[in-house]
Image (cartoon, rainbow, N blue to C red):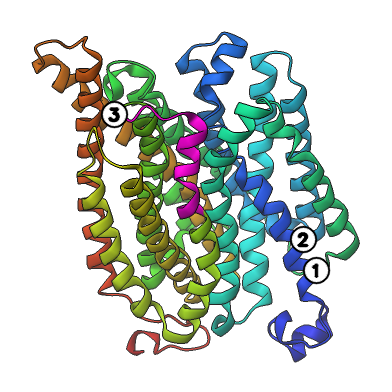
Amino acid sequence: MTDKQSTKYEFLADDPNAKVLPVVISFLIGAFFAILNETLLNIALTTLMEQFDVSVSTVQWMATGFMLMMGIVIPASAVLIQWFTTRQLFLGTMAIFTVGTTICAIAPTFPILLAGRLIQAVGTGLLMPVIFNVFLLIYPPHRRGKVMGVIGLVMMFAPAMGPTLSGIIVEHLGWRFLFITVIPFALFSIAFAYKYLQNISEVTKPKIDIISLIFSTIGFGGIVFGFSSAGDGDKGFLQPIAYIPIIIAAIALVFFALRQLKLKEPLLDLRVFKFPMYTHAVVMFLIIIMAMFASEIILPMYMQGPLALTAATAGLVLLPGSILNGLMSPVMGQLFDKFGPRVMLIPATAVLCGTMFMMSRLGLHTSTWVIIVGYILLMLSVSAIMMPAETNGLNQLPKHLYPHGTAVMTTLQPVAGAIGVSVFISIMSARQGSFLQKAANPNDPNTINESMVAGVELVYLISFGIAILAFILALFVYRATPREISSDSANK
């Protein structure tokens, strides 16, 4: 944005001569395929175990390593956004992602495949904060609901489609095509952005605090590593590889937080939590991420276990909910612009509560239609909660905190994902173990299936309790406006 534009128009979208659409298209194409990779391998892990002759704990690093690397690089995005132009950051992150994808596609061994996966994660981790920050700069608060809904289509639809596409591609084409099919779209995104993308953000080049970067890497990386490692052994969180990294990470995060509050130019400005609706949005965001991961990890295991469905069928069962989630996100954004957050969040969290309770009643002979309907309700409620809550929270921040607000939320996504996966799988495994200990014939296949059902029921019962917390929080939401524009937002 030029100085002339910035004096006449506070937001680029208000300038009738500004070419906003190419910017949006460039970002959405790249973001869709980058984020798609977060869950694209979920159903393919068994195939990779057989292909490379590796154990469950080893192949798990395809998912764990991805989240770990994202947790490390995202906190630095707030500073990088202020060091490089929009074009440099987007083209750079997409190039990194494409290189990682290509390495994965041609990997002859598992270590090379994992290395490519980690490179993918660097590009993906840096991409989303850039997109959020640019969209906040382009669109004024009263128009953000719709555009954030479009981002929601990408953020929620892409990872939700991952298991479905993965099951079909692996079964009919082979696992390498999970990466081969992404490469042309990534290259197109780079070419399109190179021609049309213009610079939006202002380059200020703040000082980078290396000590903060070290604390951040140890803290966020350690949390993801520790919680993810809890599922590697029978002892869960009681094994040293799980609790030692978590303890070290917690200490590092305390020092990180204290240092950020003292620095004039923090790596990640935690003063964003002084704004009540932003803090509210973060808590809602974490609850929804955990609810989604509970379903996206536990449901496929339940369907391929007790219900004896194939990987492709399990993916197709989740497809209607995934499609509706993507299609409804922009609609929910428009409704947010028109009616505000209360009208969206209160009924949506009520539906979420009912859905979690319904899923806690799953059994050995549950019809697939019940799962389809339950997943549709879950994804519809998620689309009505996630982006409206997140947009409302970001709307309350002053402009100079946009990079930090988006960086905090995107940092917490892999952290919440790692915690959600490890905690829910640990709960399910513990319930299974307890069930089998009391069973007369623990080696009977039907008994084993019953034990998994008992574990799934407990996971969703706990998710029901978390959903009730989300409903209570929704009762206290109000429409937020930027503090530097309006000081009476709390009264609206």
Mark pair 1, 3: CA separation: 45 Å
Mark 2 highlights which residue? 26
- In the image, is residue 67 above or below residue 319? above
- Badges 1 and 2: C-beta atoms under 8 Å apart? yes
Q: Residue 338 or 285: which is nearer the viewer?
A: 338
Check disc 2: other Cα within 10 Å, few if <14, some if 14-19, many if 20+.
many
Q: Tell whether position 185 is magenta.
A: no
Give the label on residue 299, or none.
Answer: none
Q: Amino acid at mark 1?
A: Pro
* Residue 426, numbered label: 3
Q: Disc 1 to disc 2, how far (Cα)?
A: 6 Å
Give the left or right position of residue 449, taking residue 293 as reference: left
Q: Quadrant location of the C terminus?
A: bottom left
Q: Position of residue 468 (x, y in %)?
A: 21, 59
Asked if residue 373 is positioned above or below residue 9 in the image, the reply reads above
Residue 27: x, y in percent?
72, 59
How crowded pointer 3 is (Cα within 10 Å; few <14, some 14-19, many 20+) is rated as: many
Looking at the rendered structure, the secondary structure element under dot 3 is helix
Q: Quadrant of the N terminus?
A: bottom right
Q: Which residues are magenta?
A: 307-322
Regarding mark 1 in the picture, which secondary structure is present there?
helix
Measured as percent of width and height from the top left, residue 399 is found at 59, 74
The mark that comes first in sequence, 3 or 2, is 2
Of pointers 1 and 3, the one earlier in the residue sequence = 1
Residue 206 is drawn in which quadrant? bottom right
Q: Position of residue 432 (x, y in %)?
A: 21, 24
Q: Which residue is mark 1?
A: 22
SS under mark 2: helix
